[in-house]
Image (cartoon, rainbow, N blue to C red):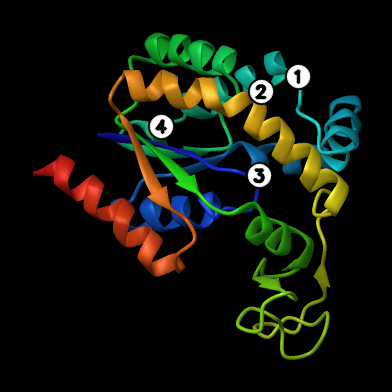
């Protein structure tokens, strides 16, 4: 069993790296962002609240997030391990997460901190476009990642859209929240000797190689 956590600023690639780890080690990828975005599309009071909060770059109330996380971890596909990203976002959440894990008889094996320059992140966020059909991701600010035809998916021909929170105002809010809340979390996991720093300025393949080498060393 291997439980992995990713800590990274918005658009640093933690979702991509989580997917790669989940695929190689055949464990589920739990993204609090995906869970919340799914809820934001529901026609309910909770859905409206989450949509408004995400659109402004704010954070959903902790008690809601705790319940969603615990409910997800109780599912049978997490018994052999999982990858989680987007949580915890504060020291208080990290402490509460430990309580959730204790109740479920789980533990954290490795925490990966992806470090990356802010200007790179800003271009990633404001240029990100997603296919509404196949969910392929593009970036109009990158020659390597932009679609061949503007607003059209290269893979399936579907329309591309920009997420509500992929704007400069929301990014700045999210980045400031991240930097102000994350430092205590980093120290918290460093003190437990389970935190590993990853250079996120490199290519996706090179970043994954750094991560996978650390995981593999722990399996020996």
Please state which of residues 17 and 185 is positioned toward the viewer in this rendering: 185
- Residue positioned 67% across, 66% down in the render: 135
- Residue positioned 83% across, 32% down in the render: 50
Can you see residue 65? yes
* Image quadrant assignment for residue 175: top right
Q: Is residue 127 left or right of residue 72?
A: right
According to the picture, the residue beneath numbered tag 2 turns out to be 65
Question: Which percent across, then down, holds residue 166?
Answer: 80, 54
Cα–Cα span, label 1 and label 4: 26 Å
Can you see residue 89? no
* Image quadrant assignment for residue 134: bottom right
- Residue positioned 64% across, 61% down in the render: 120
- Residue positioned 58% across, 37% down in the render: 86
Q: Which numbered circle lies on residue 105? A: none
Circle 2 SS class? helix
Q: Is residue 96 above or below residue 80?
A: above
Question: Which percent across, then down, holds residue 136?
Answer: 64, 70
Q: Quadrant of the C terminus?
A: top left
Which sits earlier in the primary sequence, circle 3 or circle 2?
3
Cα–Cα span, label 1 and label 2: 7 Å
Q: Which numbered circle lies on residue 76? A: 4
Mark 3 vs mark 4: give the one in front: 3
Cα–Cα span, label 1 and label 3: 16 Å
According to the picture, the residue beneath numbered tag 3 turns out to be 34
Q: Is residue 57 above or below residue 186?
A: below
Q: Are marks 1 and 2 in contact (CB under 8 Å)?
A: yes
Q: Which numbered circle lies on residue 61? A: 1
In this view, the residue farthest toward the left is 220
Question: Which percent across, then down, holds residue 102?
Answer: 38, 10
Which sits earlier in the primary sequence, circle 1 or circle 4?
1
Circle 3 SS class? helix
Circle 1 SS class? loop
């Amino acid at each position: 069993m291997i439980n992995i956590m990713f800590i990274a600023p918005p658009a640093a690639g933690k979702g991509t790296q989580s997917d790669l780890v989940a695929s190689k080690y055949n464990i589920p990828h739990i993204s609090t962002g995906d869970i919340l975005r799914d809820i934001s599309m529901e026609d309910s009071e909770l859905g409206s609240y989450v949509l408004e909060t995400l659109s402004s770059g704010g954070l959903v109330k902790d008690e809601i997030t705790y319940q969603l996380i615990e409910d997800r971890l109780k599912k049978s596909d997490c018994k052999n391990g999982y990858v989680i990203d987007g949580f915890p976002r504060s020291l208080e959440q990290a402490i509460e997460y430990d309580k959730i894990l204790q109740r479920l008889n789980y533990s954290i094996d490795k925490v990966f901190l992806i470090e990356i320059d802010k200007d790179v992140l800003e271009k990633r966020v404001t240029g990100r476009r997603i296919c509404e059909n196949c969910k392929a991701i593009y970036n109009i600010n990158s020659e390597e990642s932009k679609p061949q035809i503007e607003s059209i998916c290269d893979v399936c021909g579907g329309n591309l859209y920009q997420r509500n929170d992929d704007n400069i105002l929301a990014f700045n809010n999210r980045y400031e929240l991240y930097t102000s809340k994350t430092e205590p979390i980093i120290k918290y996991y460093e003190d437990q000797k389970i935190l590993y720093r990853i250079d996120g300025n490199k290519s996706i393949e090179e970043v994954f190689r750094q991560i996978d080498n650390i995981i593999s060393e722990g399996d020996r």
